[in-house]
Image (tube, grey):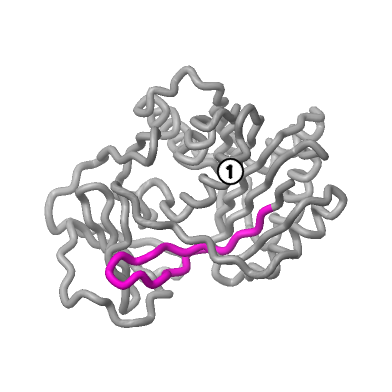
Amino acid sequence: MSDLLTIVAEPWPDWALLDCGNGQKLERYGKISVVRPEPQAMWAPALSAWNPDATFVPGSDEEGGGRWVQHRPVPRQWELSRGNIRFSASLTPFRHLAFFPDMAPQWDWMRERSADADVLNLFGYTGVGSLQLSDAGARLVHVDASKKSVEAGRSNAQLSGMNDRPIRWIVDDASKFTAREVRRRRRYDGILLDPPKFGRGPEGEVWRLEEDLASLLADCRKLLDADSRFLVLTVYAVRMSALAIGELVKQTFADLGGIVEWGEMAVREEARGLLLPTAIFARWSR
């Protein structure tokens, strides 16, 4: 296994981390600026005053909750882009904006390995990652338990002019779908696995990251073979360690050889260039 890596998302024209500190972060999404809670921003901010369009105020529930306060009117949805991919942003009830900009370096890494590839995107959410890989020449199977998220993915494909691309949009429980693919003896060239800490499937299935990740990863291994190219696992649960998921991927993929990398994902702040950590990851490649 390699040494700990830090993968950094740099600002792009439609997104930037402008400043962070005192447990919050100020970001720009196109022409809209927002403030969101960020417990890891323990330092002082660089700017003396922030003037966002909206601020997310968290609830008292440790498991989440909260509401957006709009200081100026914000559209229900507005369009952003990265490269050839166009997609909608929105102020979701879950405090994020319908995509995760810190995934950009992972998208780019997978794009380099996705030409003429069959790729499975589990917990695919609103499809920005799937469209990035499709744009690089991959054939996608996009799976998410949320019908609303899958519909958003289809809408983002339409925005990008990619309705005719080979993407299967599937509403299903990720674990159940993967197990069925194993029984069907399907194979993939790559897998993107971006599980939440907790979730429910379309029929009430319960997902708990710490309990269910190892078995899902074992099934993912069965969908890959000696000619496969990559698996990327990202985890946003702060109680887990990059060393832990790195060792899990290393042991699960030991028979395939190749390279296992693990570490932290971060975004670069424009004001000072400092790095704000966001998630941990482990990935396998040949």
Tell which of 255 and 152 is nearer to you. 255
Q: What type is the residue that disc 1 sits on?
A: Met
Q: Residues within 10 Å of mark 1 (few under 14, many from 20)?
A: many
Magenta stretch, main secondary structure class:
strand
Residue 162 locus on image (x, y percent): 43, 23
The residue identified by callout 1 is 110
Residue range in magenta is 265-283
State which quarter of the image contains the N terminus: bottom right
Q: Residue at x 21, y 58 (%)?
A: 54
Residue 161 locus on image (x, y percent): 38, 23
* In this picture, residue 165 sits left or right of residue 58: right
* In this picture, residue 112 sits left or right of residue 96: right
User: Against 30, is 280 above or below?
Assistant: below
Q: Residue at x 34, y 68 (%)?
A: 37
* In this picture, residue 208 sits left or right of residue 277: right
Residue 158 locus on image (x, y percent): 38, 24
Furthest residue in direction right, as rendered: 255
Furthest residue in direction left, as rendered: 72
Q: Is residue 274 magenta?
A: yes
Residue 58 picture quarter: bottom left
Secondary element type, mark 1 = helix
